[in-house]
Image (spheres, rainbow, N blue to C red):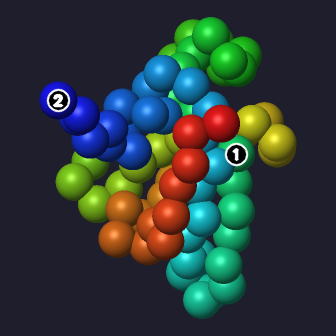
Amino acid sequence: MVQAITLEHALATGAVEVVFTKLDGSRRTMLATRNPSLFNSNGEVGDNDSYMVTVWDLMNDGWRSIRKHSVISWTVQ
């Protein structure tokens, strides 16, 4: 049986390329994760809620928030 992997699970376990629409309408591609072993941020992982997912931007070394409904696609790296 094949199980569907969720974006949140993928982010928790490794690096994910996420394509989404920013608030200004532009499209952004980000290499992101929520796996603390892949970045250095004092060991703290940002919070998620039902509308947003907080991720670590691996290319720009900082926390970013993505509105879940704005995600166009995502690919595990």
Residue 56 vertical position relative to residue 31 in the rendered view, above or below: above
- The residue furthest front is 1
Residue 61 vertical position relative to residue 13 in the rendered view, above or below: below
Give yes or no for contact between labels 1 and 2 (Cβ–Cβ under 8 Å).
no
**Dot 2, how many residues are within 10 Å of its Cα: few (below 14), some (14-19), or many (20+)?**
few
Secondary structure of the residue carrying tag 1 is: strand
Residue 63 coordinates in the image, percent (x, y): 62, 41
In the image, taking residue 51 as reference, residue 62 lies left or right, namely: right
Residue 15 coordinates in the image, percent (x, y): 62, 32
> Please, what is the three-letter code of the amino acid marked with disc 2?
Met
Residue 1 is marked as: 2
Question: In this rendering, does residue 47 appear at all?
Answer: no
Q: Could you tell me which residue is drawn at 64 percent across and 49 percent down?
A: 17
Q: Name the residue under label 1.
A: 31
Q: Could you tell me which residue is drawn at 56 percent across and 77 percent down?
A: 21
Quadrant of the rendering where the C terminus is positioned: top right
